[in-house]
Amino acid sequence: MFPGGKKGMNDLMKQAKKMQDNLAKAQEELANTIVEGSAGGGMVKVEMNGKNQVISLKIDQEVVDPDDVEMLEDLIIAALNDAQDKVSKTSEDEMSKLTGGVKIPGLF
């Protein structure tokens, strides 16, 4: 038998449902969160949502050099990585608030 009997089980189920609802709400809010990653002192900027989807890409004209395409590629990669790191950090922070700091596999 479950400790606390049927009432204890019902209370536990209510708490689990509430946490599940809070988690779904937090995931939706994170999906709508926009972060900006940048590289080259802001010469390349990437906006990304909480689903790691690129929303916009801005490239300053000064870094567009046909003789040095590799540099531009590196800046774009760096800006994308910066944005992804910020999305991950934001997700971890928000999920940590819900779980009281306990890392639950599969949540983030």
Image: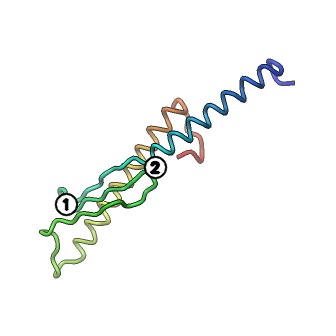
Q: Decide which of tag 1 and tag 2 comes sooner along the chain.
A: 2
Say which residue appears at 42% left-offset and 48% top-offset. 32
Location of residue 79 by image quarter? bottom left
Q: Amino acid at mark 1?
A: Gly
Which SS class for mark 1? loop
Across and down, in percent, residue 65 comes to: 15, 76
Mark nearer the viewer, 1 or 2: 2
Crowding around mark 2 (Cα neighbors within 10 Å: few <14, some 14 to 19, many 20+) is: some
Residue 96 sits above or below residue 88 on the image:
above
Residue picked out by circle 2:
31
C-alpha gap between disc 1 and disc 2: 27 Å
What x and y, as percent, mark residue 58? 24, 63
User: Which residue was labeled with disc 1?
Assistant: 40
Left or right: 6, with 21 as reference point: right
Q: Position of residue 76 (x, y in %)?
A: 28, 66
User: For the view shown, which residue lies furthest in the right direction?
Assistant: 1
* Drawn side of residue 23 relative to residue 82, left or right: right
- Left or right of 74? Residue 101 is right
Inspect the image, locate mark 2, and give the three-letter code of the amino acid beneath it: Ala
- Identify which residue is drawn at 44% across, 38% down: 93
Badge 1 crowding class, 10 Å Cα cut-off, few under 14, some 14 to 19, many 20 or more, is some
Residue 17: percent from left, percent from top = 66, 33
Indicate the quadrant containing the N terminus: top left, top right, bottom left or bottom right: top right
Give the image quarter of residue 63.
bottom left
Q: What element does badge 2 sit on?
A: helix
